[in-house]
Amino acid sequence: MSSKRSQNTRTIRYAVVGLGHIAQVAVLPAFTHAENSELAALVSDDAEKLEKLGRKYKVPGRFSYDRFEDCLEGVDAIYIALPNHLHREYTERAARRGVHVLCEKPMAVTEEDCLSMIREAEANRVKLMVAYRLHFEEANLKAIDLVQSGRLGEPRLFDSVFTMTVKEGDIRLNPRGMGGGTLYDIGIYCINAARNLFGAEPMEVVAFSANCGDERFQQCEETTSCILRFPGRERLASFTCSFGAADVSTYRVVGSKGEVVMEPAYEYADQLEQKVTIEGRTRTKTFAKRDQFAPELISFSECILNGSAAEPSGWEGLADVRIIRALYRSADTGQPVELEPFTRDDRPSLEQELRQPPVKKPELVNTEAPSE
Amino acid sequence: MSSKRSQNTRTIRYAVVGLGHIAQVAVLPAFTHAENSELAALVSDDAEKLEKLGRKYKVPGRFSYDRFEDCLEGVDAIYIALPNHLHREYTERAARRGVHVLCEKPMAVTEEDCLSMIREAEANRVKLMVAYRLHFEEANLKAIDLVQSGRLGEPRLFDSVFTMTVKEGDIRLNPRGMGGGTLYDIGIYCINAARNLFGAEPMEVVAFSANCGDERFQQCEETTSCILRFPGRERLASFTCSFGAADVSTYRVVGSKGEVVMEPAYEYADQLEQKVTIEGRTRTKTFAKRDQFAPELISFSECILNGSAAEPSGWEGLADVRIIRALYRSADTGQPVELEPFTRDDRPSLEQELRQPPVKKPELVNTEAPSE
């Protein structure tokens, strides 16, 4: 941790709750690069995961879910890498024991869940952060900085495609009430990007969902295409996300004078590329693969140590969940959906950027990648 | 003209009707590369255009609009490069005099216009073709061939952005009733691409329009984002087109195994680029700038000479116009719009490909490009 960030030499002790794919490939390895953060406990009902990962990462505390409260006794914070519909419950149980929460996105399944989590954290004076890894990532922050700077002229539109081929049985294919579906898992990246690139909140949305009819899409949709209308000098954001198509991860913002294209845009296991065209002249820059999870730990630990506000906050998490819900309401009813006014003052900026070396892909224990 | 195409050595004599930007930069120069087509007459109310362009291209027949019927006496066919709301009238006047019609797209402003044009051409036994230049263009036809071949797996989604900065006073900014607006001018490329890449007709559409409020967008919208639902194993196509943003011209089709990206996709004054990714391996190919208008003339003349059916036909023109109208109805009402079933058997294929060398940009006479 750089000295400018904190003089405090105490470290924050974390339990990682849920030891699925993202925990194993990204969260657990990230502690190596987060000097102010210590991996103190693991929570899982899979004894083999606890044993093998506990040994590998030299973690003393190993707990099953029925001993979650015992686990909380020995840590300052938890990183929630659970299925989406469990985020609220585990956040609130931790908060009630005075333990800080860094929660994977989507923050929760409903707006009510998000609000309840925010209230519970406030009432118990614990910090709550939602794990938007791209809020600390150089290429994405530079895109926001570029769009906000006016160098592309006035930003007029956002377009994005985020697709992958999800295997049968993956948690992402859960019913919507459990936070399954494309918008909760990958659409959230497009929504978050559009909101923060424009620095605004949408006022109206519409969506079409589609389904090829494969067995694996019995409980959630295959593909959703969305349009979001932003206020002021009206701007449109459109995006398509799918669990039934080859890997694509890209967005572009087109302004009156030029555009920025990110491709890949949203990946954590790959380098990112940014192409900027201003008045017809194009410049392409590649951003090396980095550890995008350590910065979240470093930042959250620092907030706890310094007593500063955690960003991305629960309000940022709610900002996306309410849009996801409006989009699904539109896809279900066939009607556009208007959103209540919503204000966000804190936006990600280059000040939040933190660079850490990439992690090596570890061997997986009783889990697998969502796609081939 | 290649000998395999026709043994007939007669040439078709054309009048070009309307001498605006597209006629001057693309249609008139194309006759140099269309050996079966002769530029026999020009129609305009601008005496300077008639004089200068008539001299430059050595065109004997020069007519004002009030002498349009006189002009028809001396030609076999007309190329209509008029404002969109005049396509129907001039098509029908030519048809009634037994003159064949090659009409710029959009074919007309309404479905009723299109149907009337088709009926009038049939009744008078003249051929009617809509000038979809990309139906003869290698890169776009190869994209269709690739998608239809199954090499990308099952095609799941289409996404496109087509934007430009249109100057105040340009004809594209006409009221919608005159065929102004983004969908008639550039959205039609996205619609036509999606339909022919999928080889299907959409069953339901939704659109949001947006307007920054600039003076130039008093009569038509600035930007429209659209989603089209295609039947069968449901597929979605989304696109955004704008007259208020920097130049972008791109589409992608993502299948279950890979994708094809065209960028630029729709240009006629630039080389095109196609990037194909199949199972993670990417290959990029550039297609040299070519004359995309001569192939239309060559193909249409050949149909007239051989008595074969003209494609893209009026039905192809209607197929796009009815979608444009449904999209605007959606944007106006805020409701998704269902489309009547519509069948197209003839789809563009590589058999139609025709390559001709590029034309040099000519000096413009009393006209200017739509954007800077």
Image: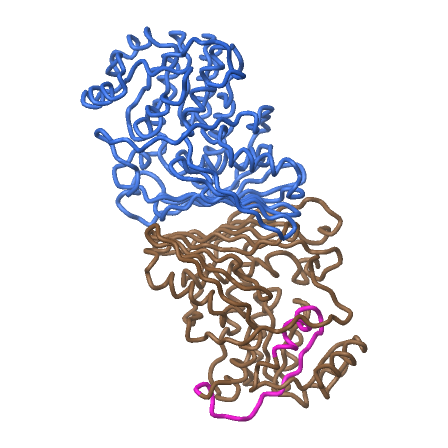
Chain colours: A blue, B brown
User: From where the camera sits, is residue A265 visible?
Assistant: yes
Check the image and name the residue furthest to the front: A3
Q: Residue furthest left?
A: A48
In the picture shown, does residue B292 fall above or below A278? below
Residue A225 in view: no
Q: Name the residue rendered at 49%, 19% in the picture.
A: A2
Query: Horizontal and vertical percent for residue B365?
Result: 76, 72
| Residue at x 42% of width, y 29% of height | A292
Q: Nearer the viewer, residue B336 or B235?
A: B235
- Horizontal and vertical percent position of residue B128: 55, 78
Where residue A163 appears, as percent x and y from the top left, is 39, 44
Q: Inspect the magenta stretch and tell me whether residue A287 lies in it.
A: no
A43 shown above or below B233: above
Indicate yes or no whether the magenta region holds residue B25: yes
What range of the chain is rendered magenta?
B4-30
Depth check: give the residue in front, B323 or A67. Answer: A67
- Residue located at (37% from left, 16% from top): A78
